[in-house]
Amino acid sequence: MPDIFAGQGKAGGVRLYTIGFTKTTAADFFGRLQSAGVQRIVDVRLNPDGQLSGFAKRDDLAFFAERLCGIGYRHAPELAPTKPMFDEYKKLKGPWPDYEAKFLKLIAERHIETTETPADLDGGCLLCSEDVPHHCHRRLVAEYLKDRWGGVEIVHL
């Protein structure tokens, strides 16, 4: 079996960052990305063009990341929840454990460990809106991939 981590990350593994853009300034947000050495933003939001996104709207974020930090950008909707799932949790104030279980089932059904590759995510940063990762699906994506791939270092910025 080939080594899927050959030539990646520290000690042959993957370094995967996560970040949220709310409750921070653009200067702090881009400063954290640049200081960490992030190579690309992987946007895991369901709606990257939402009105409340401010500097983090898809096209603006891609422009600022490249221009200010030399960081690439891609939207990865397969790593986002479905709209009904998200609405049940956020708008209807559903319990986190229910949302977590449904989301983990969804990404397992999507086989994200095969649609994403360690090379695509090494040095990448999963982006969502939540300011902390505790109750955010970006953490669930990172931990799921770590469980499937092994050799993943998760760094929450």
Image (cartoon, grey):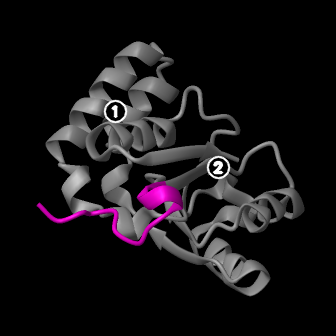
Q: Which residue lies under the disc numbered 2?
A: 19
**Secondary structure category for the residue under label 1:** helix
3 relative to 136 in the view: left or right: left
Image mark for residue 38: none
Furthest-left residue in view?
A: 1
**Secondary structure category for the residue under label 2:** strand
67 relative to 127 in the view: left or right: right
Q: Which residue is rendered at x = 67% and y = 63% of the image? A: 56
In reply to whether residue 4 is colored magenta, the answer given is: yes
Residue type of the residue flagged with mark 1: Met
Q: Quadrant of residue 103?
A: top left
Q: Is residue 33 above or below residue 18?
A: below
Q: Which residue lies under the disc numbered 1?
A: 85
Q: Earlier in the sequence, mark 1 or mark 2?
A: 2
Looking at this view, is 149 or 33 the one in front? 149
Looking at this view, is 1 or 115 the one in front? 1
Q: Quadrant of residue 22?
A: top right
How much space separates mark 1 and mark 2, taking CA atoms? 21 Å
Furthest-front residue in view?
A: 11
Nearer the camera: disc 1 or disc 2 = 2
Q: Which residues are magenta?
A: 1-14
Q: Which residue is rendered at x = 59% and y = 27% of the image? A: 134
Graded by Cα atoms within 10 Å as few (under 14), some (14 to 19) or many (20 or more), the crowding at tag 1 reads some
Residue type of the residue flagged with mark 2: Ile
Return the x and y of residue 102 as percentages of the image width and height.
Answer: 28, 26
